[in-house]
């Protein structure tokens, strides 16, 4: 599997909910499976957020794979600001 995608997905799932979202769930595992991260090319990954499926909000973001490879890049912080 894609270790970069799996690691990003794990951290994104465990860090939900994000700013502006209701604190509906109190169980820390309630958001497991919310995100799907996968490689679309040699240079890019897609982050999909099922929380926004069917809404008018953007549900997918394309990011450079190099960001996920960088130890100083925090995908959770990036997503919180982007969202």
Image (spheres, rainbow, N blue to C red):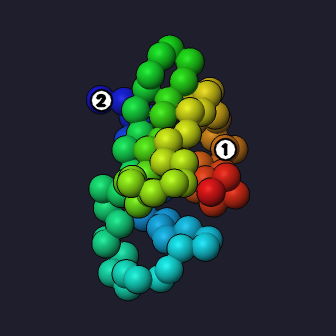
Residue 74: % across, % down: 63, 50
Q: Which residue is mark 1?
A: 73
Label whose residue precedes the other's in the sequence (2 or 1) = 2
In the foreground, 4 or 71: 4
In the foreground, 54 or 79: 54
Residue 62: % across, % down: 56, 33
User: How far apart are the alpha carbons under marks 2 and 1?
Assistant: 21 Å
The local crowd at label 2, few if under 14, some if 14 to 19, many if 20 or more residues have their Cα within 10 Å, is: few
For residue 49, say whether it is visible: yes
Element marked by disc 2: loop
Quarter residue 27 falls in: bottom left
Judged left or right of residue 15, residue 10 is left
Task: Please say if 43 is above or below 54.
Answer: above
Quarter residue 72 falls in: top right
Residue 32: % across, % down: 32, 61
For residue 10, say whether it is visible: no
Q: Tell me the quadrant of the picture where the N terminus can be found.
A: top left
Judged left or right of residue 2, residue 68 is right
Q: Residue furthest top?
A: 42
**For the point 40% across and 32% down, which residue is it?**
38
Task: Please say if 13 is above or below 21.
Answer: above
In the foreground, 64 or 10: 64
Q: Tell me the quadrant of the picture where the C terminus can be found.
A: bottom right
**For the point 54% across and 48% down, which residue is it?**
58
**For the point 41% across and 83% down, which residue is it?**
24
Task: Please say if 62 is above or below 54.
Answer: above
Q: Which residue is mark 2?
A: 1
**For the point 31% across and 72% down, which residue is it?**
30
Which disc number belongs to residue 30?
A: none
Element marked by disc 1: loop
């Amino acid at each position: 599997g894609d270790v970069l995608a799996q690691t990003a997905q794990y951290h994104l799932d465990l860090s939900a909910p994000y700013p502006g979202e209701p604190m509906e769930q109190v169980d820390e595992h309630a958001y497991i499976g919310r995100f799907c991260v996968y490689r679309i090319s040699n240079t890019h990954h897609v982050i999909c957020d099922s929380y926004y499926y069917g809404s008018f909000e953007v549900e997918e973001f394309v990011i450079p794979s190099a960001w996920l490879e960088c130890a100083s890049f925090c995908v959770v912080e990036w997503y919180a600001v982007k969202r």
